[in-house]
Image: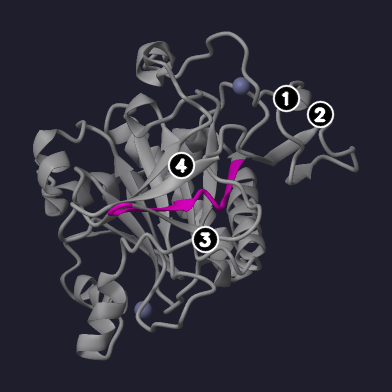
Amino acid sequence: MSEIRRDYVKNKWVSISSNLALKPKDFPVVKMDTSGAPSGFCPFCEGNEAVTPPEIFAYRKGQAEPNSTGWLVRTIPNKFSAFELEGELEEKHIGLYRCYNGLGKHEVIIEAPQHDTDFHELDLERMEMIVATFKLRYNALAQDERIKYIQIYKNRGLFGGASLGHSHSQIVGFPFNPGENVGLPQYYKDKGSCLICDILQQEHNSRERIVYEGEYFVALCPYASRFAYETWIVPKRHTEHFGQLTEAEEKELAWFCKKLSMAIVHSLGNPSYNFMINTAPVNSLYEPGYHWYMEFTPRLLVAAGVEVATGVYINPTAPEIAAPVLREMFEVHSIEAIV
Ligand SMILES: [Zn+2]
Ligand SMILES: [Zn+2]
């Protein structure tokens, strides 16, 4: 179990594990090979199902039993989760300090049974299964009233925070809204319209930061990108929750994930990266103005002292420079030509 402690200086929440107690030598930065290459035993590889907690959901070839081999995409509880969906949220006060118990849910989506297939190398059919799994688990977690915010994300490579080389993504159900996207409901209060829809309109007119426009989604490098080559995949339809994705949108999002991850890996020298799906809070008082979007953040530089100290990111590549580089990979190369 863990505690979610309030940092009153920074006005942020911090999850502190009390059951893991990693020693200095246990940290991935010390342990892991920077390439994320196979190093010994991997619990996510096909054949090692007995080592992981029992699966929550899997796409399989045929009718095989759960927790056996023959799966294509497999969702399991995170064995080292800081969160547990037991009981109710409890607030504790210790003098001037305040914390909550680590109520929540943390799941891992293993994206392929083989160890050495990277996310950008997966075929479109597998990408579609991964996006469908995200939607299925998002909507399942949203059913639990105790969960208030659902974060889907991927850590790829050492500088993206990956602790295992085997391609996987994760989903966390938080008992509160971390509030990273509160600019969206605030803009709606001030202007009476959706900020993301307004951004899409302005970007559509200028086009300089647009990477690619599809039928349902637009990929763009945001005006105030925190990271070099940061790229958002934004649904054109005003949709608050990721779980409202239609089947046609799921298919196109899978295509965008394939193209963008390929563009990042091939254009930027195989860097670490993260992706995150930002969406509206669930089981909370309704606030208009949220519009979900997915962001990819290549980790070409490590967040340094100034970013940690001030929250002001110093980005050496303007999004107007980044967008044409990624656009070239979208336009010039078909998926088949790069695979
Ligand atoms: Zn593996
Ligand atoms: Zn909108």
Q: Which mark is residue 69?
A: 2
Residue at 46%, 41% in the rendered image:
154
Crowdedness near tag 4: few (<14), some (14–19) or many (≥20) residues, C-alpha within 10 Å? many
Q: Which residue is mark 3?
A: 252
Taking depth in this image into account, of 101 and 309 the one nearest to the observer is 101
Q: Residue at position x 45%, y 19% from top?
A: 36
Q: Looking at the picture, how far across and down is residue 136, in whole percent?
A: 66, 59
Residue drawn at (51%, 30%), measured in percent from left and top?
A: 118
Residue 97 belongs to magenta span = yes
In the rendered image, the vertical position of residue 27 relative to residue 134, given as above or below:
above
Which residue range is magenta in the image? 95-108
Q: Left or right: where does residue 311 sit relative to residue 271? A: left
Distance from the alpha carbon under mark 3 to that under mark 1: 28 Å
Proximity of marks 4 and 3: CB atoms separated by less than 8 Å: no
Residue found 64% across the figure and 33% down from its top: 112
**Whole-number angstrom distance, CA of label 4 to CA of label 1:** 20 Å
Marks 2 and 1 close (CB-CB < 8 Å):
yes
Amino acid type, label 1: Glu
Tag shown at residue 154? 4
Q: CA distance from mark 2 to mark 1?
A: 6 Å
Label 2, label 4: how far apart the Cα atoms are: 24 Å
Q: Is mark 1 within 8 Å of ligand 1?
A: no
